[in-house]
Amino acid sequence: MKKLTIFHFNPLEWYPPLQNILRVLESDTHFDTIRVITTRGRAELPVFLAHSKKIVIIRLGRSGAKLGLATRWFTYFYFYSYGLFSLLKERPGRVLYFETLSGWPAYIYKRFFYRSSKIFIHYHEYTTAAEYQKGMVLTRYFHALEHWLYPRAEWVSHTNPDRMSFFLRDVTPVKVAHPFILPNYPPRNWLRPPHEVHEPLRIIYIGALGMDSMFTQEFAQWVTKWRQHVIWDIYTYNSDAKAIEFIKGLQSSNISLREGIHYEKLVDIIPQYDVGVIFYKGIIMNHTYSVSNKFYEYLTCGLDVWFSTSLLSTLPYATTTSYPKILPLDFNSLVEVDPRKLCSRNGLTLRQDHYFCEVALAPLIQKLTEE
């Protein structure tokens, strides 16, 4: 039997790229069994369900920022011990893991038990060498072990070329034998044509909301100032208390906090809006050199995208002659900018580039399934 085991320490419900990989693998006929070993998230998270019996999702313990120390360490022990036991019992020929924190079972399996197994590694985020050194001891230790895997792995990927460049620099002199770029695109069936812009302008934000790392305050103040011309809806499961308190405190009639939506249902929500917004301040390199999955999701659903000028990896996507518009904005100087000017399409031509996960994932699927 052809088997694949996937390790993803954090709950897969938080990670659309993994959900998209599983949907693509559902229709692939190469593997007889795909085991996904992850953890449970918060109770309000809609559970991701596989549509194929060959995909078995095993959720162990609980993970999340608000858990107690004992629960957290129990989950670590449970995840790693079960993960290694599962590998030794099932003996899959392929192992794919996401992020350093998921990698220990794959390392032990490859190094000490099954040298011919093929290891695949993907990073949702970029972690600097300094952040590894200052971070959790467990992650730092696992990252040191990863250096043995990099020359031997069949696949090591980051989400964009900038992150990969920094990563390769950080791990030098270790050689990464097979580096790849794997962007976070949405499914092909999300494609929607742009529609006529609403009046008032409808703006959507999806995801975690913060005060310190985002221009939440600046954007909310602009939306409040232009309340006759702008509506802003925020869909979030995972926001810090300070951000929620700030938004509620504004008591602005044109800003709404809404409960987060299951990823696969977003395609029914996003096209109802005109603009998707991304406003990280770029305080850390992981943000500065990111092209958010939200960026591609907004575009694919036909929306304009507004993003902060501090997001350097997103800047090359900016448009000047076409729509959907991709606009870098200085959120510190936004308050006097007329939203009607920002959304105007006068003199612009339609150009909707295609960003589909099925295309982006094809090289990974090919590597996973080749003999």
Image (cartoon, rainbow, N blue to C red):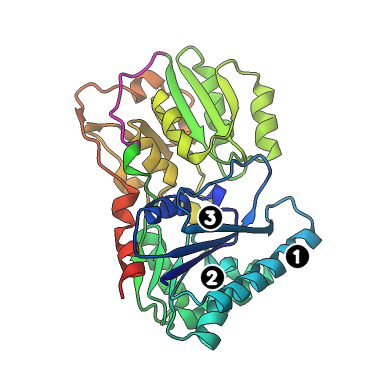
Residue at the spot of label 2: 129
Total labels: the figure holds 3
The image position of residue 314, as x and y in percent, is 37, 47
Instruction: Mark 3 and mark 2 in contact? Answer it, CB < 8 Å.
Output: no
Instruction: Using a 10 Å C-alpha cutoff, classify the residue at mark 1 as few (fewer than 14 neighbours), some (14 to 19) or many (20 or more).
Output: few
In the rendered structure, find residue 284 and report the number of the disc placed on it: 3
**Displayed quadrant of residue 194:** top left
Three-letter amino acid code of the residue under disc 2: Ala
**Displayed quadrant of residue 256:** top right
Three-letter amino acid code of the residue under disc 3: Ile
Three-letter amino acid code of the residue under disc 1: Phe
Mark closest to the chain's N terminus, 3 or 2: 2
Question: Where the C terminus falls, by quadrant?
Answer: bottom left
Stretch of the chain drawn in magenta: 190-199
Q: Kindly tell me whether residue 286 is visible in this rendering.
A: yes
Q: Nearer the viewer, residue 321 or 43?
A: 43
Q: Is residue 224 shown above or below 314?
A: above
The image position of residue 339, as x and y in percent, is 40, 21
- Tell me the CA gap for discs 3 and 2: 13 Å
Residue at the spot of label 1: 74
Q: Nearer the viewer, residue 276 or 66?
A: 66
- Tell me the CA gap for discs 1 and 2: 27 Å
